[in-house]
Amino acid sequence: MVLLLCCAAMDPTQTRELVERTWDESILPALVEYIKIPNKSPHFDAEWAAHGHMQRAAELIAAWCEARPVDGLSVEIVRLEGRTPLVFMEAPGDTDDTVLLYGHLDKQPEMVGWAADLGPWKPVFKGERLYGRGGADDGYAAFASLTALEALQRQGGRRARCVVLIEACEESSSFDLPAYIEHLRGRIGSPGLVVCLDSGCGNYDQLWSTTSLRGIVTGTLAVDLLSEGVHSGDASGIVPSTFRVVRSLLSRIEDERTGAIRLPELFVDIPAQRVEQARLAAEVLGDVAGKYPFLAGARPVEGEGAELVLNRTWRPALSITGAAGLPDLASAGNVLRPCTELALSLRVPPTCDAAGAARLVAETLEADPPYGARVRFTPAEPGQGWDAPELAPWLAAAADGASRAYFGRPAAYMGEGGSIPFMGMLGAEFPRAQFLITGLLGPQSNAHGPNEFLHVPTGKKLTCCVAQVLEEHHRAHA
């Protein structure tokens, strides 16, 4: 006979009290200091090492974590030559199984459009929101992970060995991360569960688990026609506008009337389960487009409910995120410009080959240039999308139970339109692992844009949920 002895489940009241106290007294003050640090990701600050902001952010997080009363915890800032730092933590558990908890500490650039009393490096509390760049995306991840471990330990809960990995290159497509994964392979082990705190939530009313992530192809499209600018009155009508050439090239990729992508190779068959989850998510959310700050009279693209969810999560879409060669309005003289450059951001479906998509986009844009213009598409490292493995019954039950315990509503599932390259790497590296991908980026939180904020009550509840899922993981595998 085999006798299985399980400890009592965590008391939600005790968990909530400890987590809320830790957030109020320790996490939020640390996040205030973190938001002040302009540690932009390497793509947006080529001199990041010389500026020292990334190191400051890593040291702030490491120092806070080292002070937490988690038995056996080790904290280290790992530095590989020429690469962004990585905060690596280990906490022994009651079994040899491993849970990997992931987040990142690098940030997007400032962006324009912040409210007069707000700013990217200016932490401001307004009601239940903490404004500033990087708090929700996702500076809170390390603090929440350690607090979940502490809450579990305080009640005598049991869990697997935990590894916490906080990288500093995620907003630059994680190009440093593979080197760290290889360097730390023996110390990471083989995770049975991955908890990622860098995703979003459809609302602030329940625990959301991300089922898929789109891939991304970014790059610069450059069109040159002249060696120097010339008077528009003299040249227009004879010399083509580089802007018009760019516009025609983009039409090879996208239907400008509808936004539909014109390259059939960038579409995939959407799994039936994801279609059903999109339908259920649309029912929960109601007005799917309601979270976006449309001006009065403006409206989203055609489609409703589940179709909009699938547009955002399983279909390709193009955005123009930057430009060069265009003077600001105050300096825009009557000159026909010699060149135009645009930053392209193409989201591709989770299971689409992102590297192949980058090659296809380059070939499509560079073929047969109009007017013999010099056309170049220079892609950055593409980010592969990710589709979660089938959800294990124990994890489905654990997520739902945690959501009901701390939010009072069942868990919900939906794909994300953004990219977390690390998930694709881990999915390939550990195909048997289960994934809880979640986060705080809900309605109006506006990650990457102006007025980004962290919804504090959701941060507290999410931390409680992580603690409970860790205990349920141990219970399921004991």
Image (tube, helix red, strand yellow):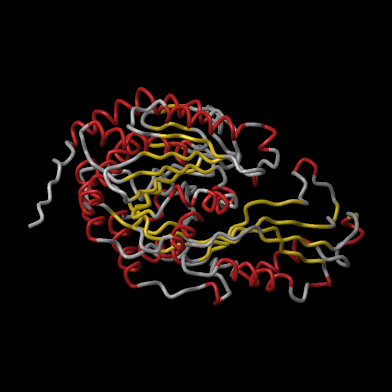
User: The N terminus appears in which quarter of the rendering?
Assistant: bottom left
Q: Is residue 415 above or below residue 96?
A: below
Q: Residue at x 59, y 69 (%)?
A: 357
Q: Residue at x 58, y 52 (%)?
A: 179
Q: Residue at x 28, y 38 (%)?
A: 464
Q: Is residue 326 above or below residue 306?
A: above
> Is residue 29 toward the left or the right of residue 259 in the image?
left
On the image, which quarter does residue 94 sit in? top left
On the image, which quarter does residue 212 sit in? bottom left
Q: How many marks?
A: 0
Image coordinates for residue 430, horizontal then vertical, percent: 41, 60
Image coordinates for residue 434, horizontal then vertical, percent: 34, 58
> Is residue 405 toward the left or the right of residue 300 in the image?
left
Image coordinates for residue 393, horizontal then vertical, percent: 23, 60
> Is residue 261 toward the left or the right of residue 101 in the image?
right
| Residue in the foreground of this view, choosing between 467 and 350 | 467
> Is residue 264 toward the left or the right of residue 223 in the image?
left
| Residue in the foreground of this view, choosing between 433 and 309 | 433
Image coordinates for residue 241, horizontal then vertical, percent: 80, 62
| Residue ranking furthest to the front | 1
